[in-house]
Image (spheres, rainbow, N blue to C red):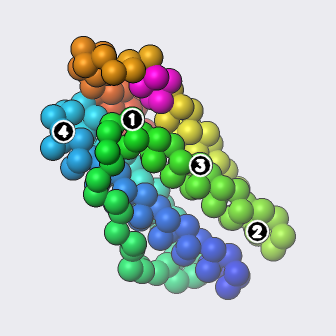
């Protein structure tokens, strides 16, 4: 049985993962309107991935005898200024999600809920990957600078990263 404190914290994380999906979806739409097909595809895939993170938490809460809740989500920003600003926003958001997961892991220790602690280790590892990917993308953007030809190549690179991630996810 899951404690009230852990259930509340997991429901908070469910909301965060849902909002993350919406943020990526808004970014996908914005990128698509800018003609950045590869970036849009990447963001659509990331949106789906965040939704799966939410569902995984949702099912876990219910399987442990808790009550996973659907809550109203805050709407994401719809404008990003530039693709660089969009990816900086993405990186900051991933840092926020990592901090939230870390707080949740800490709470499981305080409550001696080792089953939930073990379950959350997948999220800890996932956030390491998410942050590393965002850093790598920002490094590429810095290399591009204002070079429009570089932006074209970057868009194609992101499309390939997205395709590789989709293939890896399908293999699981």
Gap in Å between the C-alphas at discs 1 and 2? 35 Å
Please say whether residue 140 is one of the residues in the magenta stretch: yes
Disc assigned to residue 34: 4
Q: Earlier in the sequence, mark 3 or mark 4?
A: 4
Residue found 61% across the figure and 39% down from its top = 128
Toward which corner of the image does residue 50 lie, by quadrant?
bottom left
Disc 3 packing (10 Å; few <14; some 14–19; many ≥20): some
Front of the two marks 3 and 4: 4
Residue under label 3: 95
Residue 157: x, y in percent?
32, 21
- The quadrant holding residue 163 is top left
Q: Is residue 112 above or below residue 22?
A: below
- Figure quadrant of residue 85: top left
Q: Residue at x 41, y 64 (%)?
A: 19
- Earlier residue among tags 2 and 4: 4
x then y, percent, for residue 62: 52, 76
* Residue marked by disc 2: 107
CA separation in Å, label 3 and label 2:
18 Å
Answer whether residue 122 is visible to the viewer in this image: no
The alpha-carbon separation of the residues under discs 3 and 4 comes to 26 Å
Point out the image quarter for the C terminus. Answer: top left
Q: Which residues are magenta?
A: 137-142
Q: Residue at x 63, y 74 (%)?
A: 9
Q: Are marks 2 and 4 in contact (CB under 8 Å)?
A: no
Residue 58 locus on image (x, y percent): 48, 70
Q: Element type at marker 4?
A: loop
Mark 2: few/some/many CA within 10 Å (<14, 14-19, 20+): some
Q: Which residue is mark 1?
A: 84
């Amino acid at each position: 049985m899951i404690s009230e404190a852990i259930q509340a914290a997991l429901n908070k994380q469910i909301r965060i993962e849902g909002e993350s999906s919406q943020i990526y979806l808004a970014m996908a739409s914005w990128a698509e309107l800018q003609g950045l097909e590869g970036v849009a595809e990447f963001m659509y895939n990331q949106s789906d991935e965040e939704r799966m993170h939410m569902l995984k938490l949702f099912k876990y809460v219910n399987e442990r005898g808790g009550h996973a809740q659907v809550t109203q989500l805050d709407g994401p920003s719809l404008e990003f200024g530039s693709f660089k600003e969009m990816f900086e926003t993405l990186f900051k958001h991933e840092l926020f999600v990592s901090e939230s997961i870390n707080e949740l892991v800490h709470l499981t220790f305080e409550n001696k809920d080792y089953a939930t602690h073990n379950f959350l280790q997948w999220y800890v590892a996932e956030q390491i990957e998410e942050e590393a990917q965002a850093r790598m993308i920002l490094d590429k953007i810095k290399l591009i600078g204002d070079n429009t030809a570089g932006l074209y190549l970057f868009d194609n690179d992101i499309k390939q990263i997205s395709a590789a991630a989709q293939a890896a996810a399908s293999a699981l």
